[in-house]
Amino acid sequence: MHPASAASPSHAPAYDRMAVALHWIVALALVGQVLLGWYVHEIPRGTPARGWWINLHKSTGLLLGLLVLFRLGWRLRQGAPARVTGLPAWQRYAAGASHALLYACMLALPLTGYLASNFSRHGIKFFNTALLPPWGADDKAVYAALNGAHVALTWVLVALVALHVLAALTHLVRRDGVFARMVPAAG
Ligand code: HEM
Ligand code: HEM
């Protein structure tokens, strides 16, 4: 049987095990990455500690970007299980749109961070060991624009995740089978 169509205990088609594992690993890693970004924000500029923590943030952010690419590749290859029947049309559209926006945000964040870092003479010191030399000019205006987009996107992500979690919890309360698609133990 195609893994994406495996029946959950409630007999609704559920996400396959790899999709569920990737969802929860990426969700945890994203929360850690945002907290790390906010922590770096609090460290005074020009101190050695800031350089160390920002390079850690850049390195884990790049790895997370690769993991998101893998997750998206898996999703495009496997597809999503058929929707739970009986959901109102607006919920089906809202789910499709918000999931697409979440993926877009998860890709745009590491991309803007990576691009910004290449328009600064600091580049990326991968896990504070190997320098990935910047391929762009040391251009403060370009850096500020890309960095501004990076910071703005963090708030878009936070808002989308808040909505997503609220929606997931309403499905949990209603026990309509949607929650169990991503939390097989709740089936
Ligand atoms: C999914 C991946 C990522 C997330 C969720 C993320 C999130 C964040 C957050 C929350 C901040 C703090 C924003 C603020 O000051 O309010 C931040 C700052 C920053 N991030 Fe990321 N980031 C990611 C990936 C990356 C990558 C891959 C790089 C570079 C290679 C990067 C470079 C930076 C830099 C340079 C700052 C400092 C901005 C500043 O304070 O001027 N980030 N990031
Ligand atoms: C950073 C946090 C999170 C992100 C970025 C995220 C992202 C996503 C994405 C992109 C999907 C669509 C999967 C696909 O079709 O490929 C999804 C589905 C889902 N997520 Fe999350 N998620 C997060 C946290 C959570 C949390 C905390 C919960 C539960 C409280 C949750 C519950 C669900 C459920 C139930 C589905 C399946 C929805 C459906 O069947 O249509 N997620 N999530």
Image (cartoon, rainbow, N blue to C red):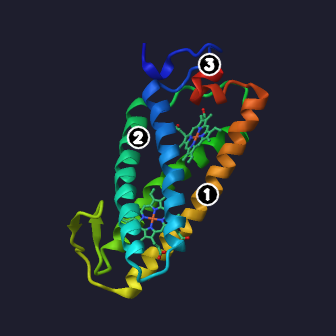
Does the beta carbon of the residue at mark 3 sit less than 8 Å from ligand 2? no
Q: CA distance from mark 2 to mark 1?
A: 20 Å
- The residue labelled by disc 3 is 12
Who is closer to the viewer here, 22 or 176?
Answer: 22
Q: Amino acid at mark 2?
A: Arg
- The residue labelled by disc 2 is 71
Under tag 1, what secondary structure?
A: helix
98 above or below 182? below
When asked about the image quadrant of residue 92, the answer is: top right
Q: CA distance from mark 3 to mark 2?
A: 22 Å
Does the beta carbon of the residue at mark 2 sit less than 8 Å from ligand 2? yes
Judged by depth in the image, the label closer to the viewer, 3 or 1, is: 1
57 above or below 82? below
Q: Amino acid at mark 3?
A: Ala
- Residue 75 visible? The answer is yes
Who is closer to the viewer here, 66 or 100?
Answer: 66
Which badge, 2 or 1, is on the more N-terminal residue?
2
- The residue labelled by disc 1 is 158
Quadrant of the snapshot with the N terminus: top left
Side of 50 relative to 84 (left or right): left
Which badge, 3 or 1, is on the more N-terminal residue?
3
Whole-percent x, y for residue 44 in the image: 49, 80
Q: Dot 1, how many residues are within 10 Å of its Cα: few (below 14), some (14-19), or many (20+)?
A: some
Under tag 3, what secondary structure?
A: loop
Q: CA distance from mark 3 to mark 1?
A: 29 Å
Q: Amino acid at mark 1?
A: Val
Which badge, 3 or 2, is on the more N-terminal residue?
3
